[in-house]
Image (cartoon, coloured by chain):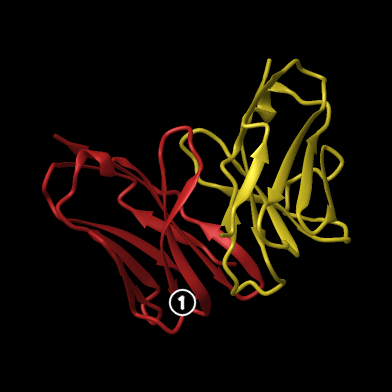
Amino acid sequence: GAVVSQHPSWVICKSGTSVKIECRSLDFQATTMFWYRQFPKQSLMLMATSNEGSKATYEQGVEKDKFLINHASLTLSTLTVTSAHPEDSSFYICSARPGLAHRETQYFGPGTRLLVL
Amino acid sequence: KQEVTQIPAALSVPEGENLVLNCSFTDSAIYNLQWFRQDPGKGLTSLLLIQSSQREQTSGRLNASLDKSSGRSTLYIAASQPGDSATYLCALTSGNTPLVFGKGTRLSVIA
């Protein structure tokens, strides 16, 4: 149980285009979803937290107009990287949690590798 | 603000050795602590989860301990194998924060 999927697993795009990444909880309802970003040989950095039906809360330094997050249902969250540039190339990982409490376990997706040319 | 530090950043050992990876954190009011494994270019594999009320967890050759008072956790790997080579990440939740990750320890087990 507690499976989280991401699609696509990798994507290559041209600079200036927008890319949408999907995160789905397959066998549970995810009240809260998180988006992390990982640059090469770096750790995971939290970008934003989203609760179903509410606006996402972004971490300091993350541009909310560039990284659009939608969490319209209890099983799906999307991250759209708008007007992507080479510096946005990274590994994006989502995680999902059944409830609101931080003490609950987060379940991670397999990640999406983005390369912007 | 919770900060998670992992030492060493990289470690290379011969096959068969027992080894210890260290994780320290600044806010001892944690809910739980997890150890993850990440292979190059891949996602995360959860290895062990320790709740704040627990002192240790074991799974096969892995044993993780938690000492909240000193702000430390260790991951012990017994009889290391080349297949254990990966980056090991420590992460924890505390207060009003979701999982916060350390920078990881890159482990190489040499056959």
Rendering quarter of residue B75: bottom left
> For the residue marked with disc 1, what is the amino acid?
Gln
Q: Picture coordinates of residue B11 (x, y %)?
A: 25, 44
Which chain is home to disc 1? B
Rendering quarter of residue B18: bottom left
Name the residue at 36% across, 70% down. Answer: B72
Q: Picture coordinates of residue B104 (x, y %)?
A: 41, 49
Mark 1 nearby-residue class (10 Å; few <14, some 14–19, many ≥20) = some
Name the residue at 82% across, 21% down. Answer: A17
For chain B, what colour was chosen? red
Q: Picture coordinates of residue A5 (x, y %)?
A: 64, 45
Choose between A114 and B73: the one closer to the eye. Answer: A114
Name the residue at 66% across, 58% down. Answer: A27
Q: How many marks?
A: 1
For chain A, what colour was chosen? yellow
The answer to whether A59 appears left or right of B28 in the picture is right
The answer to whether B6 appears left or right of A94 in the picture is left
Rendering quarter of residue A11: top right
Reply above or below: A44 against A98. above
Q: Picture coordinates of residue B109 (x, y %)?
A: 20, 40
Report the quarter where the C terminus of chain B lies.
top left
Q: Name the element at disc 1.
A: strand
Reply above or below: A92 against B20. above
Choose between B52 and A60: the one closer to the eye. Answer: B52
Name the residue at 37% across, 62% down. Answer: B23
Which residue has dot 1 on it?
A: B51
Report the quarter where the N terminus of chain B lies.
bottom right
Reply above or below: A12 against B12. above
